[in-house]
Image (cartoon, rainbow, N blue to C red):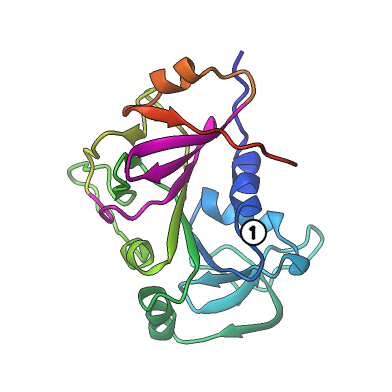
Amino acid sequence: MIEKRSRSEMARAVARDIPSGSYVNLGIGLPVLALEHWTPADEVVVHSENGILGMRALAHDEEPDPDLTNAAKAPVGMLPGGSFFHHADSFAMMRGGHLDYCVLGAYQVSASGDLANWSLGDTGRADAVGGAMDLAVGAKRVHVVMEHLTKGEQPRLVAQCSLPLTGAGVVDRVYTDLATVDVTNNGFVVREMVPGLTRAQLQDRTGAPLSFELEERHA
């Protein structure tokens, strides 16, 4: 039986691979869970597009401040030295190449690094891209965290996106509940798989060819 990564384990894998001293933006939903896997000692500076630098997760017994929320309107805390600024300044940071990483959710990622994460293309539904386009083209590296398959058991890693694009050729690495996959000039390269999963099983769940260069990982 294949034991998938939990949402927390996926977020932990993301957090583990971001080096100390990085400036990072975390998208709404699954990406922001990475916040729970850093401590002040990790010296990862987290940005939120509503105008925060130095965001941290609340401690379990910490009373939330109703005036201190991230872009998803979820309560957060601040590291010592954290700052607040105008929304326009926040987007200037995003567009100006000042973020080392952004971590986004996605509906699809293509083998050439195209990202589709803002619309399922449903008629009559008002989708909004938010700051995802700015982040996708402005951050130095774009990582995606998402489930490997849709609820309908269709691959999210595909040869070519069928959904409206957020950005073309922007994704560097993808974390799923089954694997960690880099996007390279030669397509998808698998760096890590969950225990018990075979290469054939992972390929069967992926909509584009995979190559495998597995890395040794330590807890």
Residue at the outermost right position = 61
Q: Nearer the viewer, residue 139 or 151?
A: 139
Residue at the image position 38 percent from the left and 51 percent from the top: 171
The residue under the point 32% across, 27% down is 207
Residue 173 against residue 68 in the figure, above or below: above
Of 46 and 58, the residue lying toward us: 46
90 relative position to 19: left or right: left
Question: Is 4 inside the magenta-drawn segment?
Answer: no
Relative image position of residue 124 (x, y in whole percent): 19, 46
Q: Is residue 153 left or right of residue 125?
A: right
Residue 70: name its quadrant. Answer: bottom right
The quadrant of the picture occupied by the C terminus is top right
Q: Which residue is mark 1?
A: 35
Region of the chain picked out in magenta, as a range: 165-194
- In the image: residue 133, left or right of residue 75: left
Horizontal and vertical percent for residue 189? 43, 36
Relative vertical location of residue 9 with respect to residue 84 in this rendering, above or below: above
Q: Quadrant of the N terminus?
A: top right
Residue at the (63%, 61%) spot, across then down: 19
- Please, what is the three-letter code of the amino acid marked with disc 1? Leu
